[in-house]
Amino acid sequence: MISKEIEKILPLVQKPGRYTGGELNSITKDKSKVDIRYAFCFPDSYEIGMSHLGIKILYSAANARDDVWCERVFAPWHDMEEEMRKRNLPLYALESGDPLYEFDLIGFTLQYELSYTNVLNMLDLGGLPVKAADRCSLTPIVIGGGPCVCNPEPLAEFFDLFTLGEGEEVTDEVFDLLKQCKKNGSTKEEFLRKAAQIEGIYVPSLYETDYNEDGTVKAVTAKDGAPEKVTKRIISDLDKVHYPDKFIVPYIEVVHDRVVHEILRGCIRGCRFCQAGFLYRPIRLKSPDTINDQCKRLCEVTGYDEISLSSLSTSDYTRLEELLDKMLSWTIPEKINIALPSLRVDNFSDSLMEKLNKVRRSGLTFAPEAGTQRLRDAINKNVTEEEVLRTSAKAFSGGWTSVKLYFMLGLPTETYDDVAGIPALAQKVVNEFYNNPDKPGGKGCQVSISVSSFVPKPFTPFQWEPQDTREELINKQKYLLSNVKTKKISVSYHKVEISFLEGVFARGDRRLCKAVEYAWRHGCKFDSWDDSFKFDVWLKTFEDLGIDPLFYTSRKRAFDEILPWDHLDFGIRKKFLIDENLKAHKNETTPHCRIKCSACGASKLNGGNCDAMRSDMV
């Protein structure tokens, strides 16, 4: 319950529904009857955080325990923060209204590198020192999880520990240990040393990094009994792991205002630019019966009329049509839409299109990623132009009139011919519409091109590659636009300065901690939002601290260089990544996991098992 002081300022801010709590299906408990109070923090706005599936899963899983109360905390927007600081009101959790500093465990999900300054801002606004070394008592413990934890070094000074991989089970073990340490009167140092022995837990204060004269990492050394390598945690059986039986229903519109259901983890494809495709291996599928039952229950308790079947590549779910048959039997009578957000052009079948036509039709989105076949081969996309055009024609015959195509600029080995190939491919899709005798009558076609800037990421075959400079990316954007010849094609692209900063922190080391703090103290926050991004402050930060950002972005790494994240194990063999990198420079492809296992190494995390090769899943 929010305080009277907070109530007084809500009329002064935009979207007060962000800050009230009390939504349908939110969970309140008697705080005197729980042992661990857990603040789950999303370092972005309420609308972004409440759209994220991970927070829904972990919120529900933690609150399933009688001895834990998990509450939600989001980054307040600028107007709300200004009013809170003016009145010296601390950041609070939505369920109880209690300030952040009263919690035992404060968890941040780290989805994006440009949320780092928000983490510091939330800690500070919550009444806590931002540096872990300055928080001396046992509680609160600050813990981080999510995809950015594959390289958490630029945040190492601010967090007490990180969870590598999937959090459903490992978080329970952290709860149990903290509960015991509180009971025993243990110190924070004693807790951290014990936590480091939990598989999947990385305690950065128990590791020291030394550097060579050229600035590269010389060694990362574990101390006080911490493991030399920390291995990520995974969930083996998605049918048995906890999944929410209810979602919180926001009072205000959020980005993804629907039931979202995860149907598989991992990806069979091996696109060489895609960090998620490697981080979430091995591939594990949830059964159609489990998905159907859970989706039906969630629609009943939320009132949502749309379900999004979520994964990295939804059409690679081998039993998708069986699943859709089960779901359509009740979604059609209930007028509930089913969205498939991650389709591939090479397996968009006639029968799948027929099933999609039974529900409300939304736009189709495909991701060729590159404009030419040579570059698609280099990044191992394994999609041909013929497949893109054939699928587009099939969609137009089925009644669709708009298609969105995702591409990237700045991919390794890219040339200006590859850039020109992007609008050329889009034009061929437009032509496919007008040459199609079965196209919808009386309607025009719209092809939207969304172009992002490639950022090399850890644990991918391109982790050693240089990132294009800002000038190179801007020139490529201009060249792309100059090759668009029709209003039937619209183009949107990302701000190159934001991609540049993302690139700095994606492959950064601990020396960047001071840059995060310096930029935050000079006003940086909500860096991923165009209207909040202060690129000039970031450039001055690097200059004042003597940091060369191009060292992290534009420098090609040698295969034998020690990388800042080499002491973390996400299951992927480095030799496999090196081989994939070399094949990229020869424009050679690797077949996907269902055709042939390439021995990436991830199955070792699951007892040697991977659903890509299971006979009942193929």
Image (cartoon, rainbow, N blue to C red):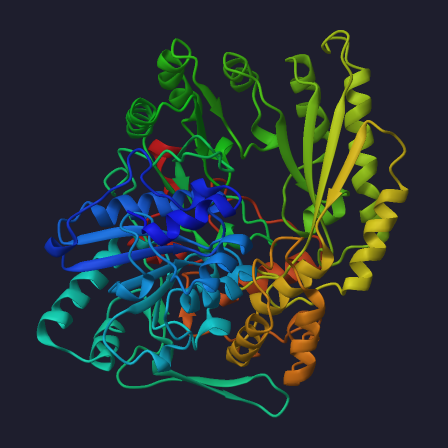
485 vs 567: above or below:
above
**From where the camera sits, is residue 287 visible?**
yes
Residue 410 placement: quadrant: bottom right
Residue farthest toward the bottom in the current orientation of the protein: 213
Return the residue nearer the eye: 603 or 2: 2
Q: How many marks?
A: 0
Residue 540 placement: quadrant: bottom right
232 vs 354: above or below:
below
Q: Position of residue 512 (x, y in %)?
A: 55, 77
The residue lying at 56 percent from left, 28 percent from top is 347
The residue lying at 74 percent from left, 42 percent from top is 492
- Quadrant housing the C terminus: top left
Q: Position of residue 400 (x, y in %)?
A: 66, 17
Q: Position of residue 559 (x, y in %)?
A: 59, 74
The residue lying at 46 percent from left, 39 percent from top is 311
**From where the camera sits, is residue 163 visible?**
no
Q: Position of residue 584 (x, y in %)?
A: 67, 57
Task: Say whether residue 542 is left or right of residue 203.
Answer: right
